[in-house]
Amino acid sequence: MLLRVLAAAAAVAASLSGSSAFGVDSLPTPPDRIVIDVATVNGSGCPAGTAAVAVSPDNTAFTVTYSDYLAQVGLGSKPTDFRKNCQLDLRVHVPQGFTYAIASADYRGFAHLEKGANGTERANYYFQGQAQTTYASHRFNGPQDDSWQATDTVDVAALVWAPCGEERNFNINTELRVSAGSSDPTRSTSFMTMDSTDGNINTVYHLAWKHCP
């Protein structure tokens, strides 16, 4: 059954910076609320019930919250734990006369990387029926024991817009990888999360809007 998510809580809205975050102030914002249906959530980084989507009240962004997205190597790790991924298949119900594109995405999490170890976050985005885009990738090198943040941005001229007059699912593929590198995985554990021990981590996707012809 589809999970229908309407407007986010005020606390989520306060964390969003709006269209100015990606330099498209001149583009319009639809007056009506958008609705996002989560068609499917698949992947080792987002088991059933561990990812949720909320839309900002001003329609400039939506937030994905993860609660079990962790990649690790070393003590206590399984051979497959070094890589975790999540694919979100979203149905975005767009107000009449508008289309949208993803202008930027902000990723946050926590990383504990031993000296010599490294971690990578990467993502790509595409509409149903279109070729997948090139991955945007961000690497983090140990030693590190702190929160991390990465941002993917798209120039306005390069935005890929949803087809006008059609409803096509929007797909987001994310991935976390951790490598022991030159560290000793028999003595320590390195990990990278898109969640945290004291609360969930939000990934924010900023929307750009324009009028359909």
Image (cartoon, grey):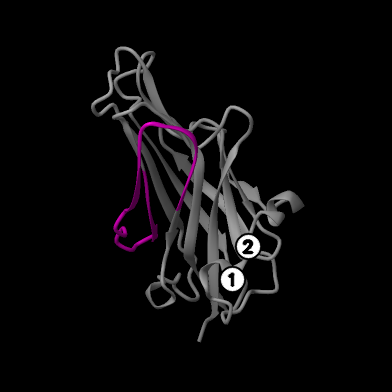
Instruction: Work out whether 93 lies above or below 142.
Output: below
Q: Residue placed at 39% from the left, 13% from the top?
A: 76
Q: Which residue is mark 1?
A: 20
| Secondary-structure class at tag 1 | helix
Q: Amino acid at mark 1?
A: Ser
**Which quadrant of the structure image shows residue 15?**
bottom right
Answer few, some or many: residues within 10 Å of disc 1's Cα (few below 14, many 20 plus, some between 14 and 19): few
Q: Position of residue 5 (x, y in %)?
A: 65, 50
Taking 85 as reference, is 26 left or right? right
Viewer-side residue, 53 vs 206? 206
Q: CA distance from mark 1 to mark 2?
A: 7 Å
Quarter holding the N terminus?
A: top right
Q: Position of residue 58 (x, y in %)?
A: 69, 65
Residue furthest left as drawn: 182
Instruction: Work out whether 109 lies above or below 62.
Output: above
Taking 181 as reference, is 194 left or right? right
Viewer-side residue, 196 vs 54? 196
**Which quadrant of the structure image shows residue 163?**
bottom left
Q: Which residues are magenta?
A: 121-150
Q: Are marks 1 and 2 in contact (CB under 8 Å)?
A: yes
Q: Which residue is mark 2?
A: 17
The prevailing secondary structure element of the residues shown in magenta is: strand
Q: How many marks?
A: 2
